[in-house]
Amino acid sequence: MFLGIDIGTSGVKAVVLDERGSVAGQGTAALTVQRPQPLWSEQDPEAWWKATTAAVRAIAPEVRRSVRGIGLAGQMHGATLLGADDRPLRPAILWNDGRSDTECAELEASVPDLRAISGNIAMPGFTAPKLLWVRKQEPEVFAQVRTVLLPKDYVRLCMTGDKASDMSDSAGTLWLDVAARRWSDTLLHATGLSEANMPRLVEGSEIAGQLRAEVAESWGVPVVPVAGGGGDNAAGAAGIGVVSDGDALLSLGTSGVIFVATREFRPNPDRAVHAFCHCLPDLWHQMSVHLSAASCVDWAARLTGTTSVADLFALAESSGVASGPELFLPYLSGERTPHNDARVRGAFLRLDNDTDPARLAQAVLEGVAFALADGLDALRDAGTTVEQLSVIGGGARSSYWGSILAAAFDTRLVYLKGGEVGPALGAARLAQIAVDGGSAADVCTPPPVARTVDPDAALVAALSEKKQAFKDAYPRITPKKGS
């Protein structure tokens, strides 16, 4: 059996797969995000470790005792700053933190080749600009930095004592030469760092270390190898078999992602499309990334006073698709693709006297779908062909939302059994390859199809006016850059 651990933003999920690839056990533990100032988003790295231990221990003891390898997945981009004693110097600055937009401009100005090397435009969500911010605003902290780790790799350090990271997660730092799959001295020096401050690089399907004996005893698992793993989206892709050129997925987690595997490095930074390494050797991927997806659904449930996300979906369905004029722009934490705007914020537009909680709930589901459709358009503008999308993440549970998404994209959605397990599934499969060998084609096979959702022509037509109004609305809610 193989254990996959996903260090997410809202919680840690641990999943054990048996030799047939079926889920034999799973556990979760919640996390919270701290927002001490506008644009800030932070977490305590020690909370990741405590939640990881709790999630693993929630799995049945007899299942834990059979584990033969562990893989890690995690939220990307988080700046975890360690001192000489390998302890965190401050809370980790997360992927959806927007404080470093000024530093992004400075970084691009100081490194004209940044986009060519990293394959990406500098955005506040990435790790490198966060370090520039710390160097300017917290110089006493920056002076003590000895190592910078990503969230899952801090958990790896606690597990194994090793400082290592995989290519897919490291590609999201803006310090990696993504085509060459190695650290870039040019990009590191631009932020006052060197390769000595970075973890060792491995492929996601390689062994990166061994579980420490005291951790194994605490968790009730054997001392086993720990694989490199992957950033959450790449690991999620590996879990559902998105491992060949042109394979594509839609991830409906806290953030929303459209991910397309590519056989070569294919950047398109001008449309804020990400180009990263995959978590498997000799593969890359493109992504459109949206900072708020299922998080908007959670927020709307609180806003409307519904008791659960399932009740929110039912409330929206009672209203129906395009039932009112309301528009929701889901930029609660800013946006990446295609706008690259950390400061834009969400908005409801076109409310009237008949607006009620059901129509607001419906507008939220539509608004997230329209934002994701914007990202899909950016990928297609880059020459990427997407014929269908496999769906993963917590938002994959709702068939009703699926009908809205398929219509907004005008693209088939394929829901896979177990797809809601998400990146932890891929992390376990990467551990299997690392321990037992075998190819990604043999191990990372798609789960059985639970259902497909084709775009309904009537819904496509019903949403067309609102979709265009959504596109037209963004410039009206954000000031022009430089104004």
Image (tube, rainbow, N blue to C red):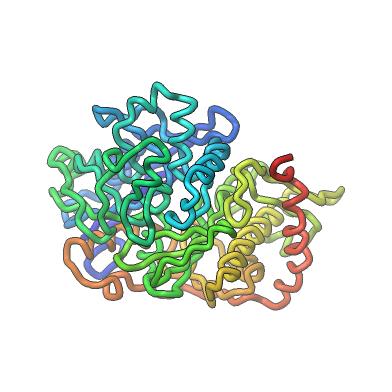
**Which residue appears at 53% of the width and 72% of the height?**
384
Residue at image location 43% in from the left, 35% down from the top: 131
**Image quadrant containing the C terminus:** top right
Q: Nearer the viewer, residue 91 or 170?
A: 170
108 and 145: which one is in front? 108
Q: Relative to residue 160, is residue 109 drawn left or right?
A: right
Q: Provide residue 84's location: percent of width, then percent of height.
A: 25, 28
| Position of residue 440 in the picture relative to residue 465 (left or right) | left
Residue 395 in the image: above or below residue 157? below
Given residues 195 and 19, the one toward you in this image is 195
Residue closer to the observer: 5 or 344: 344
Task: Identify the residue at the far right of this view.
Answer: 353
Taking the image as shown, residue 149 lies to the left or right of residue 62, namely right
Instruction: Residue lying at the far top in this picture: please name it.
Output: 140
Residue at left 28%, top 40%? Answer: 53
Relative image position of residue 63 (x, y in whole percent): 21, 55
Q: Is residue 332 left or right of residue 288?
A: right
Q: Is residue 407 above or below residue 111?
A: below
